[in-house]
Image: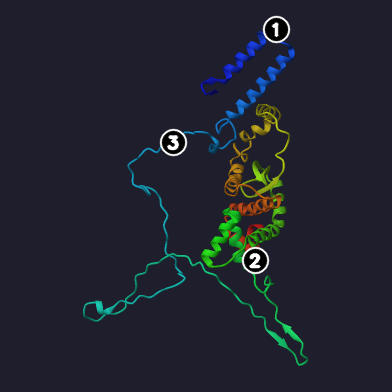
Amino acid sequence: MTIENIDIEASIEKAQIIIGEDKDMSPASKSMFEILILIITLLVNRLNLNSRNSSKPPSCDRNRAKESKIPTGKKAGGQNGHIGKTLKKVDDPDEIKEIEADRDLLPPGRYKHVGFESRQVFDIDLSRVVTEYRAQVLEDQKGNRYIASFPEGVAGAVQYGTGVKAQSVYMSQFQMIPYNRVQDYFADQVFMPVSDGSIFNFNKEAYELLAGFEERVKTELAASDVLHADETGINMGGKGHWLHLASNTSWTYFYPHEKRGRIKRSKSRNLLERLRDFEDDVLRFMDNKPVPFSNNQGGNDIRMTKVQQKISGCFRSMEGAGIFCRVRSYLSTCRKHEVKASQALELLFKGKLPDFLM
């Protein structure tokens, strides 16, 4: 490694030779210099880490060269031979608007209706819907009053519905949008005030509703033939913690913890011990077809945690990290079973679960 035209490795090697050849240097001085050289070597090795020789992401590489885009001369958009996707007409449109021909603009003559030409416009309708439940009050001849039962879940004089809760959790936990921007969305789009305390309560309610799911996913993964495991560092209140993952192609489980595992050892020692002690595990993919060559499944499942850390910066507490992990475990598992995240949350707040969990 070279720093400001100084070859660090060569300089360290030269210093070691000088120390070894100096007969007048005391043993204490030699020991001190050897310790200093060791510290310098460790620091240099740390500076030299990048995405190619360590687990650091490419975004951490200093002055990384970016591939320049070479002009191809092709027009923007889909190219010839590309199988594109477009909207298709539906058989049951939500609204039909009849358009009558202006006969005043037609040439003189007699006309009869023979059909129509249709065009469909796909749009969205973001609006607030307030439903008022009025429970009938009956009174008998003695003055005793009887009130009809409200639907399950309608407990307060004013409250948020399941749609608001599902949308809030979807944006804050799945799309990882900060609380203040979730508030802006509800205020701007549907003219509904939602406090950050309410958003947290919605997330916590989802967490509590998913307690049974967490036990189920642990059971399923424990019985799995192939299990992917991974971990990534997270910032929790300014301190380093770890988010662990266990998953397969059908189930995902995240959980936060203060520690990564055993006491850290050198990378070379870890590699040597693993190859020596777990030779059968390292080479299992060669004679056991279900075992994949790589841990890509685990890497893909845990990758979005880094996005959350870049957006939010940290988790404020272990409780917040636990909510994130359990909700993300549920949504990731649902997506693996082809259940949309928004649909999964709607079902959850209605007291139901997707069919694959029944």
- Residue 24 is tagged as 1
Lower position in the chain sequence, tag 1 or tag 2 = 1
Residue topped by disc 3:
67
Spatial CA distance of label 2 from label 3 is 49 Å
Where does the C terminus fall, quadrant-wise? bottom right
Q: Where does the image place residue 60, in percent across and percent down from the top left?
A: 55, 37
Q: Where does the image place residue 301, in percent across and percent down from the top left?
A: 60, 46
Picture residue at 56% right of the left edge, 32% below the top: 50
Picture residue at 63% right of the left edge, 34% below the top: 287
Q: Amino acid at mark 2?
A: Lys
Residue in front for this viewpoint, 29 or 145: 29
Spatial CA distance of label 1 from label 2 is 83 Å
Res. 290 image quadrant: top right
Can the viewer see residue 319 in this picture?
yes
Q: Is residue 202 left or right of residue 90?
A: right
Q: Amino acid at mark 1?
A: Asp
Placement of 297 over or under 212, stated as above or below: above
The answer to the question of whether label 1 and label 2 lie on touching residues, with beta carbons closer than 8 A, is no
Placement of 181 over or under 106, stated as above or below: above
Q: Residues within 10 Å of mark 2 (few under 14, many from 20)?
A: some
Picture residue at 63% right of the left edge, 47% below the top: 314
Lower position in the chain sequence, tag 2 or tag 3 = 3
Q: Secondary structure at mark 2?
A: loop
Placement of 146 over or under 166, stated as above or below: below
Placement of 194 over or under 9, stated as above or below: below
The answer to the question of whether label 3 and label 1 lie on touching residues, with beta carbons closer than 8 A, is no
Spatial CA distance of label 3 from label 1 is 55 Å
Task: Name, please, the residue furthest toward the right.
Answer: 142
- Residue 350 is tagged as 2
Q: Where does the image place residue 115, in percent across and percent down from the top left?
A: 34, 74
Q: Nearer the viewer, mark 2 or mark 3?
A: 3
